[in-house]
């Protein structure tokens, strides 16, 4: 009964361990990709807001600079 509850006595199944390592590596890869995409998104957002700020300035109606 105890063997049935604890599983195979010979240790962990190597296929299970290999699958777990593969899944852990996949999670790390996805986390790295997420960080990269978030950084890219932040850069694009900053560039878009900078462009819209420049476009919102009307040079024809701007006051002359003080000299």
Image (cartoon, grey):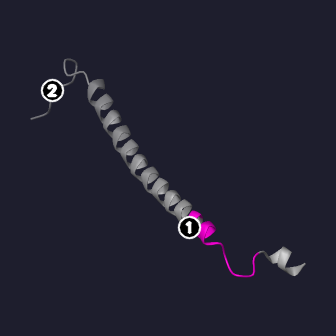
Position of residue 17 relative to residue 28, above or below, is below
Residue 52: within the magenta?
no
Residue at the limit of the structure toward the right, as seen here? 1
Q: Please give the range of residues in magenta.
A: 8-19
* N-terminal label among 2 and 1: 1
Q: Which image quarter holds the N terminus?
A: bottom right
Position of residue 5 relative to residue 62, above or below, is below
Residue 22: % across, % down: 53, 62
The kind of secondary structure element at disc 1 is helix
Between 26 and 10, the residue placed more toward the observer is 10
Residue 52: % across, % down: 32, 29
Q: Which residue is mark 1?
A: 18
Residue ID at (27%, 25%): 55
Circle 2 Cα neighbour tier, 10 Å, few/some/many (<14 / 14–19 / ≥20): few
Between 5 and 63, the residue placed more toward the observer is 5
Residue 16: within the magenta?
yes
Residue 41: % across, % down: 40, 42
Between 17 and 60, the residue placed more toward the observer is 17
Residue 10: % across, % down: 70, 82
Residue ID at (19%, 17%): 60
Residue 56 horizontal side relative to residue 42, left or right: left
């Amino acid at each position: 009964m105890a063997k049935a509850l604890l599983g195979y006595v010979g240790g962990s199944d190597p296929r299970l361990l290999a699958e777990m390592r593969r899944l852990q590596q996949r999670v790390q890869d996805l986390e790295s990709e997420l960080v990269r995409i978030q950084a890219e998104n932040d850069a694009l957002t900053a560039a878009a807001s900078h462009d819209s700020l420049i476009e919102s300035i009307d040079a024809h109606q701007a006051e002359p600079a003080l000299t």
